Amino acid sequence: MESPVCQDGRTFVEVINEKYSPENFPCRRGLGIGVVVVPTACPQGSPMKDRLNLPCVLVLNGCGITKAGDQSEIAAFCAHVMELDLSHNNFQDWHEVLSLGLFIYSFSVFPENTEMIKDRVMHIVIIAHGSHVAHELRFFFFSPFFVSTQSSRNRKKTCHIDTTSFQIGKIVSNIPNLEFLNLSSNPLAGMTLEPQCAEAFSRVRRLVLNNTQVSWDTVMLLTREIPELEELFLCLNEYSGVRASSVVCPSLRLLHITDNNLLDWGEVRKFGSMFPGLDTLVMANNNLASIQDSKDILQRLFPNLRRINLHNSGLNRWEDIEKLNFFPKLEEVRLQGIPLLQTYTNKERRSLMIAQLPSISLLNGSLVTESEREDAERFFIRYHLHCPEEELPRRYHCLVNKYGKLEPLAEIDLRPRCHAQVEVHCEEKVEQLNIRLDQTVAELKKQLTSVVQLSTNSMRLYYIDRNSAFGPDELKYNTRALHSYNIQDGDEILVVPKTK
């Protein structure tokens, strides 16, 4: 039976208890499978079973989660978890998913010296606006959610902290081995993230924030507080611009920022200064108009870029394609659906792109072989043979130096003929008839019934090759295709009525 969903939503602890309960895994094998729950002295008891079958990859998408739940149980069950998918839940902003507003944290700091506090336990009383219930929690002073500016004996302090990051952070901070976190499609727009809360994400290496409308300032804060962040996904967030940051994130290797509103290369340029180690840049479905930087700037800003995806961008000049050669380590390019290539055939698109990009080894996901590259470069030369000198691309002259000025290829049509104009002879009657060569002998007989006024069972057909010295060849096999007889224009079909 599904656990009831309260008015304020469900907790992370409730969901993992429901999804990974032993009742859902009747075929467990062997002893010691799962995570042991150590019984506590809590008078209310733990809502968990004696054992949960928690894998190291937790997928909890679309579960209606709004709160963390008991931190001690998260820590007990999730210490081994490395990947966590919380997409399509109801975390509404970084600071208070339950819309409780600002919390007043009242606490007393007993030691005089701040340096001595880090090993002491703080007693914090949390009072929610509009609530008559006070919840007592215990935190260590170095918790990322604890805010303090000074210490003094028995002095009361008041801190204002928003708490959806408190809720998300309570989950993340209690999963010490977490490397992958997916928060896609949680409504996180509109609120800023405090640096003290962002520290909870410091162990994450891959972070997915697709369709969250999270602000760019929050993104920059997270990249600053996550020292080993390698992959960042920011799709569908409606970014039309990004704010440059003086603090770089050298560890980032992949930036996935598709389906946004980035139109100006000046915004893309900022990624190079913020993420100098960037290896892969995926920018599909941004209507980027052009690549505006010079060779020196592109080499300086993107020294390690190996892969770029510009699917469905607004590029419409070959000069922009040529500039892709300025990225010093570029190996893979994805460029489909751009205005520049709309008027070309599929073969022309691929050949012209390969010829323009001599250093790439993968184009649109397909390997570029040496033979394909040579064919493409020769095609490029012939394609531009009749262009005016002033319109020839720079790449044309490079390839002419390599292969010479090539002559056009002879046009030879090797496709099978589809029709033939033949003479049909039946006794004294002669008719000119256009016949399909892909049809069978039986189908030709049906076509001739109206010409010679005979039924299909009352006729014999003979093929006469006008250029052959041999006599008529009877078409006796009804299922044989006419093109197999090599019938040509001007040949004859002789119809002979069967004798009774």
Image (cartoon, rainbow, N blue to C red):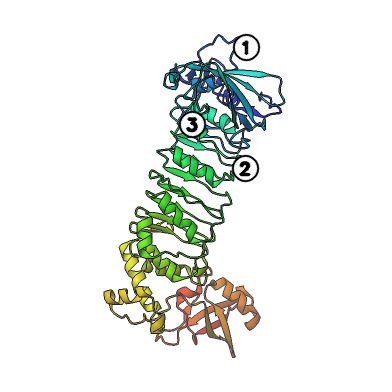
Q: Which residue is painted at 62% across and 32% down in the image? A: 96
Q: Name the residue tied to disc 3.
A: 200
Which residue is under mark 2?
A: 190
> Which mark is first along the chain, 1 or 2?
1
Crowding at mark 1 (Cα within 10 Å: few <14, some 14-19, many 20+) = few
Q: Amino acid at mark 1?
A: Gln
Q: Percent x, y for residue 184?
A: 56, 41
Report helix, strand or loop for mark 3. Answer: helix
Q: Which label's residue is closer to the chain start, 2 or 3?
A: 2
Looking at the image, tell me whether mark 1 or mark 3 is earlier in sequence order: 1
- Under circle 1, the secondary element is loop
**Does residue 172 sit above or below 211 in this rendering?**
above
Callout 2 amino acid: Gly
User: Quadrant of residue 133 in the image?
Assistant: top right
The reply to whether the C-beta atoms of the residues labelled 2 and 1 are less than 8 Å apart is no
Q: Residue at x 62, y 74 (%)?
A: 446
Residue 44's disc number: 1
